[in-house]
Image: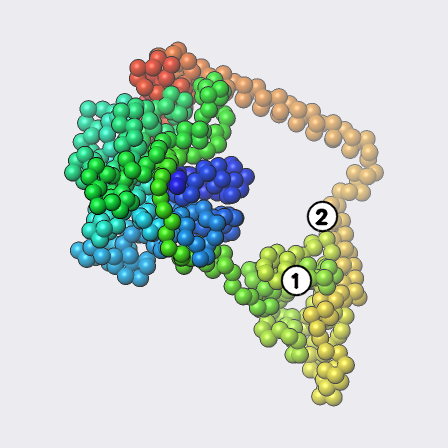
């Protein structure tokens, strides 16, 4: 069995990069694939994002709009299976749960009694965990929160997040369950896991907590990568996205695979056995998924203009052996296949015709005759023109609607803007007011005999409702044409004078052309002057004597929005002379002091 974890930095972008969700999943050749930072809201889940042949998927999405952000995290687990029903495959979960507090599943999880309901709801509100139970082990797909050094609110949230998560782990371990924890935890535990780590790097409270849960510190978990490669250096999984740091491998290892619990062997004497030695064949970093590849142009030699495809993270995987099948079971109800927006709901004819319609008053309405083939739809929302379908099959009327594109289970309806064949005439509301529908002039107050006769001989149908009223359409079009001609002549009284003086007209055209040319030449000269001024004002970095690049402060504070210059080269180790030299200068001393 192969398990992969990958912070995709936007699932839509990775699907677009690979061409389809299926191609993305196949590229890993793995049985369980865990994505973080999917950046998809629950209402945006569609079949092309969650369904792929041969895979079952489970999603957790952001449920809050904290600080005005929506869809900024999210996790998803994809399981490769031969069948989602009556299967004994270990990759197919026996059970699944969104979040880890239990509240999203309907009840508080065991061991979390000391926390308030509000605390637990806040933790699970950002879509940062999906749990799948695979029989032999429980798998936590986790996207740990990020917290800046000066953001007290997020620091407290991150502390609470991992405190509650650890309580859930301890509860499961106490019941004898085995646990895998995979994902972007946003924590590099040791100095070896970070480029140019400072002397106080390991004193960070989150790094101390991470190391405390590891076996070597008396905890329950193995860091599977370090268990296999204890001394490997420069083994990073994430690089800053805006500094070109991938070129010099100036990164950090924050994507992890952790394991806690015994091995799967059933022998009486298990001395010397552990899951790593018995079942882990390999654990490594898939660096081939890096955005910057050897041979790409250096960022400071034109490479900044080249958009790199891919996430700022790379996947991490582990290969397991001797993982037996489990008892026969089917995909749990949390699977994406059962989501209403994926599984679908039965629709009525009314919901198909009236979906997503917007009120838009117009003078006349014409629908293409292609609607008779079921391809277009146009409705009126004029208050003065009301239509009656006493004997039609529609039991509801829409008072606020306009022509709109429809894409629904009942077919596709589109309005042909070049051919409008459906008209409604609303005459002044007096005794002889009438409405024309499909060429039939129906009085607004017909006699009782006329009404009976009309019902017997001229029952309205959808087809007749949208037929063309040619006389009225022609009348309106003629009137509109006459009015437009009148407006055109009245707004241009000098037209006859110009037509009578062709020499004067040609002279005006020549004068306008010369004037426009002089303006263009002046603009070009001014832009060239500005470019020379800007080029002369760009400083050279001290390390390489090369032009710097301009940046703008985006962090809220007294310098927000101010420009500064830095070395244009990619970020790298201080010991590498080819890397960024660290040059910095404000663009303007005055602007910085404002």
Identify the residue position indicated by label 2 in the image. 491
Percent from the top left, x then y, of residue 30?
43, 40
Q: Residue at x 45, y 37 (%)?
A: 28
Secondary structure state at the residue bearing disc 1: loop
Q: Is residue 252 visible?
A: yes
Q: Residue at x 64, y 64 (%)?
A: 379
Secondary structure state at the residue bearing disc 2: helix
Residue closer to the observer: 295 or 506:
295
Question: Seen from this angle, which residue lies furthest bottom?
Answer: 449
Q: Quadrant of the N terminus?
A: top left
**Quick check: 101 left or right of 561?**
left
Sequence-first tag of 1 and 2:
1
Q: Residue at x 34, y 34 (%)?
A: 281
The image quadrant of residue 502 is: top right
How far apart in space, not on screen, are marks 1 and 2 (Cα)? 34 Å
Q: Residue at x 52, y 40 (%)?
A: 23
The image quadrant of residue 109 is: bottom left
Above-or-below relation of 571 to 128: above
Q: Quadrant of the C terminus?
A: top left
Q: Which callout, 1 or 2, points to the residue nearer the camera?
A: 1
Percent from the top left, x then y, of residue 386?
64, 72
**Quick check: 331 left or right of 373?**
left
């Amino acid at each position: 069995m192969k398990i992969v974890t990958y912070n995709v930095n936007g699932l839509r972008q990775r699907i677009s990069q690979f061409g389809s969700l299926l191609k993305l999943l196949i590229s890993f050749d793995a049985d369980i694939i865990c994505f973080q930072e999917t950046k998809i809201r629950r209402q945006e889940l569609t079949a092309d994002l969650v369904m792929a042949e041969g895979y079952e998927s489970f999603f957790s999405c952001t449920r809050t709009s904290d600080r005005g952000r929506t869809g900024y995290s999210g996790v998803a687990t994809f399981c490769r299976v031969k069948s989602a029903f009556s299967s004994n495959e270990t990759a197919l979960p026996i059970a699944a749960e969104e979040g880890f507090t239990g509240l999203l599943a309907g009840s508080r999880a065991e061991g979390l009694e000391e926390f308030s309901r509000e605390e637990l709801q806040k933790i699970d509100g950002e879509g940062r965990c999906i749990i799948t139970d695979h029989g032999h082990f429980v798998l936590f797909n986790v996207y740990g929160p990020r917290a800046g050094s000066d953001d007290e609110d997020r620091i407290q949230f991150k502390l609470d997040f991992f405190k509650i998560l650890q309580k859930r782990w301890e509860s499961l371990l106490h019941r004898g369950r085995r646990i895998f924890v995979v994902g972007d935890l946003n924590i590099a535990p040791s100095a070896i896991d970070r480029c140019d780590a400072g002397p106080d790097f390991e004193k960070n409270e989150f790094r101390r907590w991470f190391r405390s849960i590891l076996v070597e510190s008396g905890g329950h978990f193995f860091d599977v990568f370090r268990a296999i490669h204890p001394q490997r250096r420069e083994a990073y999984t994430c690089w800053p996205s805006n500094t070109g740091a991938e070129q010099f491998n100036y990164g950090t290892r924050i994507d992890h695979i952790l394991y806690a619990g015994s091995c799967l062997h059933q022998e009486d004497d298990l001395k010397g056995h552990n899951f790593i030695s018995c079942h882990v064949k390999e654990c490594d970093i898939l660096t081939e998924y890096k955005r910057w590849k050897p041979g790409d142009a250096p960022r400071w030699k034109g490479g900044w203009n080249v958009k790199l495809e891919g996430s700022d993270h790379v996947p991490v995987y582990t290969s397991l052996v001797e993982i037996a099948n489990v008892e026969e079971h089917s995909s749990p109800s949390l699977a994406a296949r059962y989501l209403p927006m994926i599984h679908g709901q039965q629709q009525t004819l009314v919901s198909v015709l009236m979906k997503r319609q917007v009120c838009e008053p117009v003078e006349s309405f014409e629908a293409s005759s292609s609607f008779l083939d079921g391809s277009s739809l146009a409705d009126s929302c004029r208050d003065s023109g009301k239509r009656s379908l006493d004997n039609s099959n529609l039991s509801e009327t829409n008072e606020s609607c306009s022509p709109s594109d429809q894409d629904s289970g009942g077919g596709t309806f589109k309005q042909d803007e070049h051919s409008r064949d459906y008209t409604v005439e609303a005459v002044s509301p007096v005794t002889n007011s009438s409405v024309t529908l499909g060429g039939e002039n129906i009085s607004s107050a017909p006699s009782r005999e006329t009404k009976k006769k009309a019902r017997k001989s001229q029952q309205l149908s959808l087809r007749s409702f949208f037929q063309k009223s040619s006389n009225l359409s022609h009348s309106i079009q003629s009137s509109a044409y006459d009015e437009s001609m009148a407006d055109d002549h009245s707004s241009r009284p000098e037209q006859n004078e110009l037509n009578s003086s062709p020499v004067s007209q040609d002279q005006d055209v020549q004068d306008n052309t010369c004037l426009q040319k002089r303006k263009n030449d002046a603009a070009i000269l001014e832009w060239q002057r500005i470019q020379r001024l800007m080029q002369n004002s760009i400083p050279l970095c001290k390390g390489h004597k090369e032009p710097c690049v301009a940046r703008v402060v985006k962090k809220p504070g007294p310098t927000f929005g101010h420009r500064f210059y830095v070395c244009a080269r990619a970020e790298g180790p201080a010991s590498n002379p080819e890397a960024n030299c660290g040059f910095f200068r404000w663009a303007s001393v005055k602007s910085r002091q404002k």
